[in-house]
Amino acid sequence: MIQAIGLTSNPRKELPPAVDDVSFEARPGRVTALLGAPGAGKTTTLRLMLELQRGRGITYFRGRPLHRIAHPSREVGVLLSEVPGHPARTIRGQLGMVCAAVGVPIRRVDEVIEVVGLVSLCDERLGTLSRGMDRRLGLACALLSDPHALVLDDPAGGLSVTEGRWLHGILRAHAAHGGTVLFSTDDPKEAARTADRVITLEGGRLVADQEAADFARTRLRPRVAVRSPHAARLGALLAKEARAAQRSVEVVREDGNRLSVYGSTCADIGETAFRHGILVHQLADETGDMGPHATLPAEGLASATVVTSALLTSTSATSTSTDDADAPMDDAPMDDASTEDASTEDAPTTDEPVTAVAATGAHTPDEPGPTAESRTRAAASPGARDLPKLPPSIAVRQALSPLRPLRYELRRATGVGTGYLTAITVLVSSALLSVLLARIGHTPQPRLLAAWPRDSPLPPAALGAGLLGALAFGEEFRHPALAADRGTVPRRLGLLAAKLLVASVTALALAVLTVGCDLEMLYLVYGRDLAGVPADWLSLSASWIGLTVGCAWAGVLAAGIFRSTTAGLAAVLAVPVVVVPLVQKTLAGPSVRKAAGSSERLRELLLMQWPFGGARYIAAGARLVAQPVGGALMLSLTALLCAYLLTTLRSRVR
């Protein structure tokens, strides 16, 4: 069950809040529609429920708010707007990344892809998907962790009638298995046709909370859809007869040869057409929207949600009527009472959404959610067999593993070609730059191997490592695959550790490959004179690896704090441009004391011997930190890490 209590958004300047004191319930085993015109506050309500937006009020998912649930993705599946995935990532790669994030087996991807009908498109890029395929992928992401509740924002918006019918069938099947479904829409007919309960919003306030039948009876009015090649003549005759009989009948001329007649019946219109010899192609009862304040007269309530189709013959015995393929009656519900009067060939197919509603046996608001026995009976009923198939339930949940963030980060980093393209660019530019520096001369061999000109703040490898580190968090905020899980991109320490580890390995590989490629290019162009290994290669290697890994870490931390790839790369460049001059200026002053022998004093303090010559390594590390670049990088990393931890604690307090 979903219980929303007192949801109120923060006011914007002098404007009233977009949502003001909205409270409602969505019960298990039922489909609940959140109805409202554009701007009524539907999306804001859903974002407040999912803690994606700040405001007042609270939402309970089976008795617990979202931030108190250890694994929110197992409780609620979310679909808001488009799928927040990188356009270059494939469907299978996107689902595999989400699988790693929520901790479900990778075989779940194939099960969900088969259910949503994306088997033939699993290797397509997200940027090439149509609106319908994007909706299918979003529903697959929502169903991936087998959640109890589904929360969807206008899921059928922009879809064709067939795709919308399929999507609502999936939602109905999820409810039939005991789940809770809440979706928003601005179409009253869609809400009345597909939902069990309709919650109406207007101007950010709750104006109605009704059963679907009561909603259709009190807030929609019936009309008769007429198609005729002589629509204008028939409309004039209907209006004339209504005036003569002093009846209130409204005739609205639609596009082409279509009429919408309010206040009359199929029988009266058919008799008028027959008397005047007018050919009628379609004559059907349906429901039309009168807006959120509309009410229905008592005499028109009985058939508000009933759709019947009647085909008339003209005065010529040889002409028979046919239904138009895109008639609006295809979008309207039909019940058993109407099908008794309709012809057999015009009866709706068994996959109509409302037929599925009747088959699942939705309970009344006073009844509890469906039990396992009731779900079994619902699944065995004939109507339930017509519902779309859902992915199999996850019987055994995986325990929380520290490797889950690492698996997610590996799939995220390797799922798109940005990292590979950046690495290739760094290697090529480093090789060409090293050859150019060797041709000019006056460059020490260590700088040749690193392709680091004296006038450049950082070598290409360090800049590439910093860019890849900044992309690790920058892409999270640009394409937030984890936003539905925690309300925003999480700043959890496990995710940070995974990103730092992957960035470290990437930077290390980039540093080694850069030196290797530069050595090979120098050997091929200039021979062995410039391809030798320096005598102090060990300390130089440590400095080189520390520089690239430190730049990668600075990019990760800065992008995580400022939520931008550009900010992460700017922080990397700020180390040699801003921080290093400050450190050099500080160290250039007079020194009265020196830190010589600090490793021995540290050993005396700990009362233990350093194993394997540890004092030597500690002294080497201290010398690295004492260098201007090393000290500036260490100072920057310390400040960024403290800022990240402070931001994490602040978000948890909120």
Image: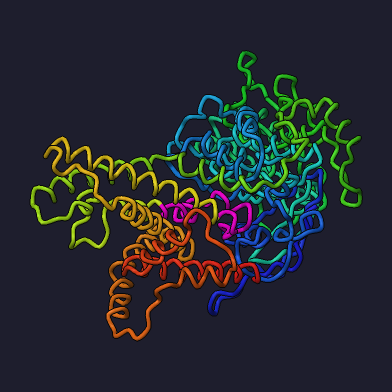
Q: Position of residue 330 (x, y in %)?
A: 64, 32
Rendered location of residue 329, percent (x, y): 65, 34
Towards the viewer: 570 or 166: 570
With respect to residue 464, does 396 lie above or below? above
Residue 265 location, x and y as percent? 73, 39
Relative horizontal placement of residue 32, taking residue 640 as reference (left or right): right
Q: Nearer the viewer, residue 124 or 628?
A: 628
The residue located at (65%, 14%) in the rendering is 317
- Total numbered labels: 0
In the rendered image, the quadrant that contains the C terminus is bottom right
Q: Quadrant of residue 254?
A: top right
| Magenta part of the chain | 469-495
The answer to whether 277 appears left or right of 256 in the picture is: right
- Residue 187 falls within the magenta-colored stretch: no
View extreme (left): residue: 440
Quarter holding residue 344: top right
Q: Residue at point 36% right, 66% down?
A: 623
Horizontal side, residue 363 vs residue 245: left or right: right
Q: Is residue 593 visible?
A: yes
Q: Is residue 472 magenta?
A: yes
Position of 311 relative to 151 (above/below): above
Task: Look at the magenta stretch and give its main secondary structure.
Answer: helix
**Between 526 and 323, which is closer to the camera in this rendering?**
526
